[in-house]
Amino acid sequence: MVMGAKGMKSPHRLGDWLARAVNTTYQADTDGFVTAWGIPGGGTEEAAILTDAATPPTIKRVSNYETSGAPHTIGCSSPIKKGDYWKELHASNVYWIPLE
């Protein structure tokens, strides 16, 4: 257990990073986080995470969009609630890390 901000023990810790597929709907077995990134011009102009209770999810919670075409990495991250569905629409790299 990890000590929290107020000295209380928390049973939660981060699990292992898991690679996930782009534009695929997943249901979260636990609370956790999804992070995504890509390089504009390589087919990725936006990193966008959708998550809600619907399948497939319809609410865009976070995104990062490139309009200038500059060669840099774009990315975004979002918390995901246990039981909700999520998917990343465009980025070339997607990772899930659960809270255990």
Image (cartoon, rainbow, N blue to C red):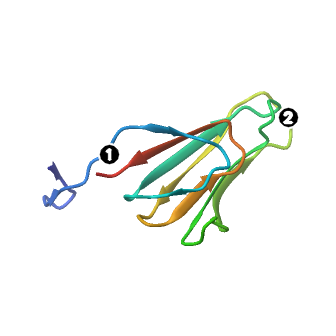
Q: CA distance from mark 2 to mark 1?
A: 35 Å
Q: What mark, if any, has residue 69 been given in the picture?
A: 2
Give the image quarter of residue 54: bottom right
Classify residue 22 as left or right of residue 2.
right
Name, please, the residue furthest toward the bottom.
Answer: 53
Q: Nearer the viewer, residue 24 or 81?
A: 24
Q: Which residue is mark 1?
A: 14
Mark 2: amino acid: Gly
Q: Nearer the viewer, mark 2 or mark 1?
A: 1
Classify residue 67 as left or right of residue 30.
right
How crowded pointer 2 is (Cα within 10 Å; few <14, some 14-19, many 20+) is rated as few
Q: Are marks 2 and 1 in contact (CB under 8 Å)?
A: no
Mark 1: amino acid: Leu
How crowded pointer 1 is (Cα within 10 Å; few <14, some 14-19, many 20+) is rated as few
Q: Secondary structure at mark 2?
A: loop
Question: Which residue is at a point 86% across and 38% down the rendered structure image?
Answer: 68
Up/down of 7 relative to 98, above or below: below
Q: What mark, if any, has residue 73 been given in the picture?
A: none
Classify residue 71 as left or right of residue 5.
right
Query: Residue 65 in the image: x percent, y percent?
Result: 76, 47
Question: Which residue is at a point 32% across and 45% down the rendered structure image?
Answer: 14
Disc count in the image?
2
Question: Which residue is at a point 68% across and 49% down the rendered structure image?
Answer: 23
Query: Residue 57 in the image: x percent, y percent?
Result: 63, 65
